[in-house]
């Protein structure tokens, strides 16, 4: 390997596989090139089974037209883009396993979409970083509900 020895490659691959965020790398045809441990754990799809699969075939419930537009925008601006749980609850419908936020069935997610340039300057792959934000999302939703209830109580007490 030029510029990168085997030891460096090994620890980088180990780090990518063990971070507490999902990492998916897609080629231009939306075929999966990288599927890290977070994605394995939450999707119950082994990395070896995911690699080479088309993302839309593996996740037919993923809104393909919407997602293709998001990726096209990233390619056009050649810069990263974000999807927050406020825009779309999740990209991948993973079960929620957190005991504190057990009131919801699925994992709320924020996603960063990163264009990956080749040595020629062409975008040949797209990286997705998926963050589990269920704890903060459920707290925010509960706070909004409480504030709405306070407004309703204030209005009803003013009417009396």
Image (tube, rainbow, N blue to C red):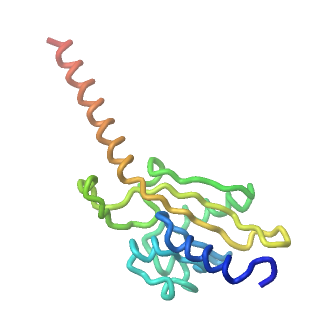
Residue at the location (55% across, 84% down)? 51
Q: Compared to 101, does 72 lie above or below? A: below
Query: Which image quarter holds the N terminus?
Result: bottom right
Residue furthest left in the image: 160
Could you say which is closer to the camera, residue 65 or residue 71? 71
Q: Total marks drawn? A: 0
Q: Is 26 left or right of 39, judged from the image as shown?
A: right
| Horizontal and vertical percent position of residue 149 | 23, 30
Q: Compared to 147, does 50 lie above or below? A: below
Query: Which image quarter holds the C terminus?
Result: top left
| Horizontal and vertical percent position of residue 99 | 25, 58
Residue at the location (47% across, 75% down)? 37
Q: Is 16 left or right of 117, judged from the image as shown?
A: left
Residue furthest front in the image: 7
Residue at the location (53% across, 77% down)? 35
Could you say which is closer to the camera, residue 102 or residue 70? 102
Q: Quadrant of residue 108?
A: bottom left
Q: Quadrant of residue 121?
A: bottom right
| Horizontal and vertical percent position of residue 61 | 42, 71
Q: Quadrant of residue 94?
A: bottom left
Q: Is 74 left or right of 60, judged from the image as shown?
A: right
Could you say which is closer to the camera, residue 36 or residue 126? 36
Could you say which is closer to the camera, residue 19 or residue 112? 19
Q: Is 156 left or right of 31, judged from the image as shown?
A: left
Q: Compared to 142, does 76 lie above or below? A: below
């Amino acid at each position: 390997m030029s510029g990168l020895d085997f030891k460096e490659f090994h620890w980088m691959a180990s780090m990518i596989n063990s971070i507490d965020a999902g990492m998916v790398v897609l080629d231009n045809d939306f075929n999966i090139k990288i599927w890290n441990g977070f994605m394995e754990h939450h999707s119950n799809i082994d990395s070896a089974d995911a690699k080479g699969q088309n993302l839309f075939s593996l996740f037919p419930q993923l809104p393909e037209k919407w997602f293709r537009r998001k990726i096209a925008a990233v390619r056009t601006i050649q810069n990263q883009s974000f999807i927050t749980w406020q825009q779309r609850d999740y990209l991948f419908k993973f079960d929620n396993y957190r005991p504190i936020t057990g009131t919801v069935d699925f994992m709320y997610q924020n996603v960063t979409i990163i264009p990956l340039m080749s040595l020629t300057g062409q975008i040949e792959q797209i990286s997705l970083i998926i963050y589990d934000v269920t704890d903060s999302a459920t707290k925010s939703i509960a706070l909004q509900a409480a504030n709405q209830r306070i407004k309703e109580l204030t209005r009803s007490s003013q009417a009396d």
